[in-house]
Amino acid sequence: MEVTPRPHDLLRLAPDAVTGDTVTGDTVTGDTVTGDTVTGGGLPRWATASLAACPWAVVRRAPHPSRLIPVGVRGAARCERQAALVPSTAVLGRVPPEWLNRRVPRLPRPAAALAAVRRCLAAELGEAAVWGPVGGVGFELATGHRVTHPGSDLDLLIRTPDRLPRELAARLVTAFCGLACAVDCQLETPRGGVALVEWARTGGPVMARTGRGPELVDDPWAPI
């Protein structure tokens, strides 16, 4: 399956993509990639086992060669995150976050928060708004593999190809602060991923996550 993935899309991988022969990777801690590139069987044992049990990975932002997709692999522990590259031909399925916003999380707090977010975004952005859950909730909804716990946050992505007024962003931040669980929302802008809470501030540059790394930008919607 040839795909044109975007950051935060979830990809279902073919079995031969998880053997180590078609995967290269670096160790990841949080958003930081460390260590030397490894090939073949160089993936950590936990990552190989995780992919064997649940052959899904999330698209990440990183420089990459043609026909290779940068992905992140989840483990059972929060510290277990692995950056990797997989061939586009190894992708059997793709689930973008916006396909998940009508599904119901299995745990009550994320479920209540997601329902409230749906109502809030429909009121503020209209029914045509393109958004969805990412992070652990999104992964679980897409794959059916349990990774969330009662204290899990709700991570969101809102696609904003057009400018989102700062005052509207501030209203969303206020609304999300009162929900059943903590909400971490990112705007997908033409310049990269921008945290909603940063854009909601009055004035000043914001950090945009790009495929080249983080960049400070004054206007995430300004032409490049």
Image (cartoon, rainbow, N blue to C red):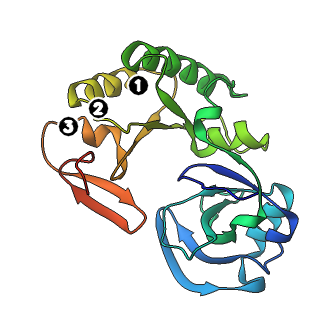
| For discs 1 and 2, the disc positioned in front in the rendered view | 2
- Disc 3/disc 1 C-alpha distance (Å): 15 Å
- Disc 2/disc 3 C-alpha distance (Å): 12 Å
The earlier-in-sequence mark between 1 and 2 is 2
- Label 2 crowd (10 A; few <14 / some 14-19 / many >=20): some
Indicate the quadrant where residue 72 lies.
Answer: bottom right
**Quadrant (top left, top right, bottom left, bottom right) of the N terminus:** bottom right
Kind of element beneath mark 3: loop
Nearer to me, 153 or 206: 206
Identity, as a three-letter code, of the amino acid under mark 1: Phe
- Residue under numbered circle 3: 201
Nearer to me, 100 or 45: 100
User: In the picture shown, does residue 70 fall above or below 56?
Assistant: below
x, y percent for residue 26: 59, 77
Left or right of residue 185: residue 66: right
x, y percent for residue 28: 55, 70
Left or right of residue 135: residue 207: left
- Residue under numbered circle 1: 176
- Residue under numbered circle 2: 164
**Quadrant (top left, top right, bottom left, bottom right) of the C terminus:** bottom left
User: In the picture shown, does residue 151 fall above or below 206?
Assistant: above
Say which residue appears at 29% left-offset and 22% top-offset.
171
Nearer to me, 126 or 194: 126
The earlier-in-sequence mark between 2 and 3 is 2
Kind of element beneath mark 2: loop
Indicate the quadrant where residue 92 lies.
Answer: bottom right
Say which residue appears at 79% left-offset and 62% top-offset.
51
| For discs 2 and 3, the disc positioned in front in the rendered view | 2
